[in-house]
Image: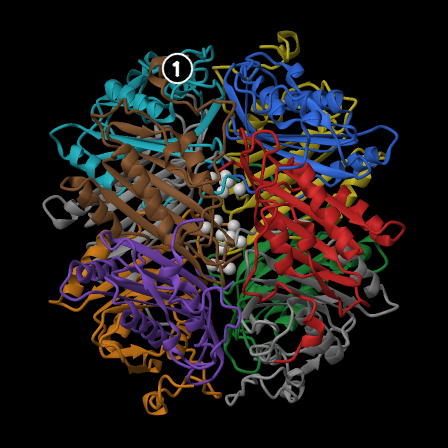
Chain colours: A orange, C yellow, D blue, E green, F red, H cyan, I brown, J purple
Amino acid sequence: MGGRKDEELKDLTLLGNQGTKYSFEYAPNLLETFENKHKDRDYIVKFNCPEFTSLCPQTGQPDFATIYISYIPDVKMVESKSLKLYLFSFRNHGDFHEDCMNIIMNDLIELMAPRYIEVWGKFTPRGGISIDPYTNYGKPGTKYEQMADYRLMNHDMYPETIDNR
Amino acid sequence: MGGRKDEELKDLTLLGNQGTKYSFEYAPNLLETFENKHKDRDYIVKFNCPEFTSLCPQTGQPDFATIYISYIPDVKMVESKSLKLYLFSFRNHGDFHEDCMNIIMNDLIELMAPRYIEVWGKFTPRGGISIDPYTNYGKPGTKYEQMADYRLMNHDMYPETIDNR
Amino acid sequence: MGGRKDEELKDLTLLGNQGTKYSFEYAPNLLETFENKHKDRDYIVKFNCPEFTSLCPQTGQPDFATIYISYIPDVKMVESKSLKLYLFSFRNHGDFHEDCMNIIMNDLIELMAPRYIEVWGKFTPRGGISIDPYTNYGKPGTKYEQMADYRLMNHDMYPETIDNR
Amino acid sequence: MGGRKDEELKDLTLLGNQGTKYSFEYAPNLLETFENKHKDRDYIVKFNCPEFTSLCPQTGQPDFATIYISYIPDVKMVESKSLKLYLFSFRNHGDFHEDCMNIIMNDLIELMAPRYIEVWGKFTPRGGISIDPYTNYGKPGTKYEQMADYRLMNHDMYPETIDNR
Amino acid sequence: MGGRKDEELKDLTLLGNQGTKYSFEYAPNLLETFENKHKDRDYIVKFNCPEFTSLCPQTGQPDFATIYISYIPDVKMVESKSLKLYLFSFRNHGDFHEDCMNIIMNDLIELMAPRYIEVWGKFTPRGGISIDPYTNYGKPGTKYEQMADYRLMNHDMYPETIDNR
Amino acid sequence: MGGRKDEELKDLTLLGNQGTKYSFEYAPNLLETFENKHKDRDYIVKFNCPEFTSLCPQTGQPDFATIYISYIPDVKMVESKSLKLYLFSFRNHGDFHEDCMNIIMNDLIELMAPRYIEVWGKFTPRGGISIDPYTNYGKPGTKYEQMADYRLMNHDMYPETIDNR
Amino acid sequence: MGGRKDEELKDLTLLGNQGTKYSFEYAPNLLETFENKHKDRDYIVKFNCPEFTSLCPQTGQPDFATIYISYIPDVKMVESKSLKLYLFSFRNHGDFHEDCMNIIMNDLIELMAPRYIEVWGKFTPRGGISIDPYTNYGKPGTKYEQMADYRLMNHDMYPETIDNR
Amino acid sequence: MGGRKDEELKDLTLLGNQGTKYSFEYAPNLLETFENKHKDRDYIVKFNCPEFTSLCPQTGQPDFATIYISYIPDVKMVESKSLKLYLFSFRNHGDFHEDCMNIIMNDLIELMAPRYIEVWGKFTPRGGISIDPYTNYGKPGTKYEQMADYRLMNHDMYPETIDNR
Amino acid sequence: MGGRKDEELKDLTLLGNQGTKYSFEYAPNLLETFENKHKDRDYIVKFNCPEFTSLCPQTGQPDFATIYISYIPDVKMVESKSLKLYLFSFRNHGDFHEDCMNIIMNDLIELMAPRYIEVWGKFTPRGGISIDPYTNYGKPGTKYEQMADYRLMNHDMYPETIDNR
Amino acid sequence: MGGRKDEELKDLTLLGNQGTKYSFEYAPNLLETFENKHKDRDYIVKFNCPEFTSLCPQTGQPDFATIYISYIPDVKMVESKSLKLYLFSFRNHGDFHEDCMNIIMNDLIELMAPRYIEVWGKFTPRGGISIDPYTNYGKPGTKYEQMADYRLMNHDMYPETIDNR
Ligand SMILES: [Ca+2]
Ligand SMILES: [Ca+2]
Ligand SMILES: [Ca+2]
Ligand SMILES: [Ca+2]
Ligand SMILES: [Ca+2]
Ligand SMILES: [Ca+2]
Ligand SMILES: [Ca+2]
Ligand SMILES: [Ca+2]
Ligand SMILES: [Ca+2]
Ligand SMILES: [Ca+2]
Ligand SMILES: [Ca+2]
Ligand SMILES: [Ca+2]
Ligand SMILES: [Ca+2]
Ligand SMILES: [Ca+2]
Ligand SMILES: [Ca+2]
Ligand SMILES: [Ca+2]
């Protein structure tokens, strides 16, 4: 069945593991990585995460969002099941939407040291208004830093139609 | 439940407040702010506001719009419930569509002194024609001013299909 | 230009009238009618009203809905501009969603004595949940009463997808 | 190239005719028919007519609609180019939406004496409200009359979402 | 501001209450009711609840669903904020999808004794397959019981297109 | 690889055949069948055929349609590649839309003697109007004849939105 | 975390099992069941399965479909992970579309003895035509048999728009 | 009700005027303006006009289009009701699609002397083909002229899907 | 009825001509032009052509595509009815998708000598894969050549979702 | 029927070949090419491949994706049926999503030595998250290398809405 060898997969403790534990506390240490086999090339990996939920820090009410994460890997790549468990750990955690997106990006930068990364959250409305924070990062002093500036400047010029239904 | 501490939230009088009053007069003083915790980073916060309504200054008939507000915070950030109450205060106020969008942006600039901001209103039709004003702003003398020019020049080159149904 | 004669239109005081007043109080007396020219036939007139807004009776916060009204006329038919002004008069009025829909239907029954009528409101969410009340009526003792039962029994078996965005 | 023979097409004066005249006056006499070759069978022909426009009888302003016409032919069938020219003749004609739909159906009944027919107009909004009249007919004393009742009773229980954009 | 009087609202402890507590345990006792003012009429109230989440009883992983609840009230009607808090109490609760839908319906029947009720959950996929349980109920021995049979027999004959994206 | 045996497929001359010939003349004899293995059961097979094109009998201009064919097999079932070649043979053939749909159904009835069958063509517009003929058939004297009546009576009560774009 | 007890789940060998084996041979014995806890009630469970693939029995080329399965459970209910593995076992199996749908339904009837069941496959096109077989079943001699007839008679009167893109 | 003062609105003769006349001849003199209150700022006003109709200069048949007009105002701004009446005056006027769009833009340039303007018409098909002309303009010798070049070069690289239905 | 004068239209032999002949052989000589009245301005004309069909050069089976053609006219402009007849002449012609698009563009360049032109074909699938060739051209040595490079480099970065249904 | 001559097609062994074999092992040698007839021009060919399936290297479970491949040909062009068979050969092959996309692009670069190429896979979700890898390449030392950088920097700034349904 070819592809990745056992040797290459040996550090992954969560993928395909039956006894998965779900943390109810914010747990960045759940994140795991594997090695990029195409380091000579710039390419983008995007995660679509429509099942994100956290709590409002002030009122405790649940918040829901779809999060889109895109990055250009350098040496390390985040394994998707560990990402899922990490995002789950926000389930009973309270923070502003704007803070959550920055925290997630910070944790992934610390984990992978990616060339480029961006995180975009699209939340459901409270009081008739919804909030969509977007943050990004490029390795300082590289062309990826310019890429981050460029993509921020061009961000979301065609807002999707929102009617709260 | 972590995240923002009470100390950080103490200036917010409206979020989670039971006795909310709804102003029927244009009331920019309703707007409140909290502090940006990620000032070292340029990032964008977007508000989707599909429940905006005002009156026509000439005929008094009600107008309806969805408003999209995006900004890059500097030191201050607008709190979303106060934004909701501020927008509500246009409910019985009369002004041209084009003026409303510029007034809202002016008020938010005065409130937050953001690095960058844009406001786009999409109104329902009157007499078979609908009007969508878009205005933006970047801090004068900074790269954000150029960002404003750039985004205006590239604004809405793919108009959504409108058929008045 | 044919069609309806001045004689037939003489009771309509609002259509095409420049000096329209918008009532800020619930005002069922604004409703006006004209005569059905096709009384020998059962046919349906539907009004799509996406610009309805009222207030929450408890908290005073604004509510927004699209209302769909369908009826089979008997002798009288409601004139659409008067309907618009009537619906506008809920703008600063507070009531539960479920009550508003029943009140609107009651007023139209009293106005027109239609053979059949139904009113369906689809509101925007509060606290993550939206409410869509549906009510209908057929002239008692006629086949239209059975029609009302039948349509209620078959009501909305394919709920539109709602994701609050 | 088979199919319909010249003999069968000889009464059609408009189809493929270069010198087509467009009438600016309501002109039901433009309608032409050809013979049904499948009279032993009940089947339905539907016309989708998204380019209908007429005038408001009171204010003279233009109205726009998509009209859907479905019928079961008996002996005669309406030729589509003549139908197009007939609908065009409403261009500078003024009448209420509800009346227009009934007039069109009456003219087609007189022309073809169909077993069953229905006409549904969906108009663009005026003052935030749009009107969609629906009328139908089955040959009196036949099962098609019951079909008309049945389809009216079941009419449009899933209103399309209308937001005037 | 008319409508419902304070007297009528006095039993509602949650609506507009600032100090809302969110229960992390399954808590059917959170549900509150108010009185139906239109008991002489059959009408339908639908709740759209796109923010439902629970846990898998076997693996502990989070599940997400949109729940549609429709009912014909008899004497009591469920208040929507209490419904929201009740649904929230499934957040850390584990059960099969099929069981959750039946439990929610059972609780609402016990609370309101509605004439008719139905609950439809549409879950996100696990392992490439998603599950959508639908259950309903009509007061035994009444026409509403027949209504329940009828609606089950006609349930979802046009499955929405699902492609897991 | 199981399933249908060579024995069962031996009469199919077109499926998987490299030297396929495309007829430019109307050619009903191209149609081939295989045997129904589930004769004890009523079930429906639907063909979606979005690539139908023929010619106008009067003007010679090309017409385009999507055709939907559904049937309940009795003993014989039409093989799909032979159906494709048969439909292709209309490519340079001229006939009215209404006639084409009836001819296709007649040919399939003669070929398969199905319990039930229906054919629906949806054509692109000419002169701003499009035509969608629908015809069906149930074996005379059986419940399938009633099924045909029933489906005709209920046909297309929710016309898709057509705007010619 | 409540809900289903270990006792109730003890016969499920696949759900949450790390060492899952994927069969490359048609394997109906993979299917597992658990007990229905709401046997007093008729309710419907629907599975959306967009990841079905099999092979053409004649040419060996891969076929792809979305399968929709709905049933009313009696005593036993199919566990969804075992259903996934069962459907996977068609991956290298060859059969006609029409046969596959009937085989799947037969296997589920044998497994669960459901009160009612239906299976609908929607395949991607070959040669410009796609095929969508639909089959259903109700326990003979019960009202569910009539339900099967009724749903077949009403099947898919609004074909989704197919354009092969 | 604040906003624009009577003084500022005194030159508008059409907005809110009951006795509106609709010209049947091309009438650029109907256009009226009001003063821009935000001249220090570049911002965009877009008009969505889905109810445009004219005649073919050769055949006299009616044409239909949706027109999108966007401009950056300088000193003067076009009033929307006067724009509506101006566009109406094309109703019985004949010209090629490409010419109409350029004429409309020329008239608005002469009226307002805007910094930038663009006009895009999307017509319904004739003979299976539809035409969408796009034209734009920036004040010569200014950055708006470059903006016009830039937007033309980037125009419509993602054509909407057109299928004439 | 103004607009284009007879003098300006005298070279058009096909528009409005009753005796139109449809060529079954590839016939670039069918193309006709009229003069550009706005030569001082760069503007774009787009043709949407959803009714293109040709044959596979190897197998003879029919292919179907929607073609989008956009160009900036210089002196000559292609007349749309002649374009329709030209595209029709591919009906019984065989060539690869990639070749057809380049041939069409070559013929239009020879006909009109446009400043800029692009042709994009989107075909229906064969064997589960569809092909969309895109080709463009700018007058050599002008800014339009750079425009062609620029648009190619930016081509289709947001592929439409294709699922072959 | 013109177009490509037999001489030009003689190296294609798979297109139109009846005895096609489907490889169950990763088989890059299946890919075949034909010669580019428009080498003087830069143009883009896109393949839409919604029927890709492979296996997870760790768990063996099936994965599904839609793959979009775009390239600018130099001398050689990939024949689409051989591409289909090549993609099929991943059917029973296991590899990470990120690796599969890079392998496919590497094989096509080796086959065709294209000026530019990009490959984008959009997978269905596992555990609530889906992954969309995108990789591209331009001939080193040419403007196509810059094109690759440019397109990566601008990649997917408008993520499609993903909700796993
Ligand atoms: Ca929405
Ligand atoms: Ca929605
Ligand atoms: Ca729209
Ligand atoms: Ca619309
Ligand atoms: Ca939505
Ligand atoms: Ca939305
Ligand atoms: Ca709409
Ligand atoms: Ca989907
Ligand atoms: Ca999707
Ligand atoms: Ca359309
Ligand atoms: Ca499609
Ligand atoms: Ca379309
Ligand atoms: Ca359409
Ligand atoms: Ca599609
Ligand atoms: Ca589709
Ligand atoms: Ca979706």
In the current view of this chain or complex, which residue is farthest to the top?
Answer: C7
Could you tell whether J117 is left or right of H48 in the image?
A: left
Q: Nearer the viewer, residue I26 or J24?
A: I26
Tag 1, which chain?
A: H
Which image quarter is the N terminus of chain H in? top left
A158 up-or-down from H73: above or below: below
Q: Is residue H6 left or right of residue J126?
A: left
> Is I47 located above or below residue E145 in the figure?
above
Residue C44 visible at all:
no
Q: Amino acid at mark 1?
A: Leu
> Foreground: A121 or H1?
A121
Label 1: few (<14), some or many (≥20) within 10 Å? some
Q: What secondary structure is marked by label 1?
A: loop
Task: Where is residue I84? Give x, y as percent.
Answer: 44, 35
- Residue F71 % position (x, y): 73, 55
Which residue reaches farthest front?
J7
Name the residue at 48% across, 39% down: I24
Quadrant location of residue J29?
bottom left
| Vertical placement of residue H142 versus I65, above or below | above
I107 or A47: nearer the viewer: I107
Instruction: Determine which residue is flagged by label 1.
Output: H14
Q: Find residue H156 and report its image quarter.
A: top left
How far from the left and from the top, in percent, is residue A138?
19, 66
Q: Position of residue H39 (x, y in %)?
A: 19, 29
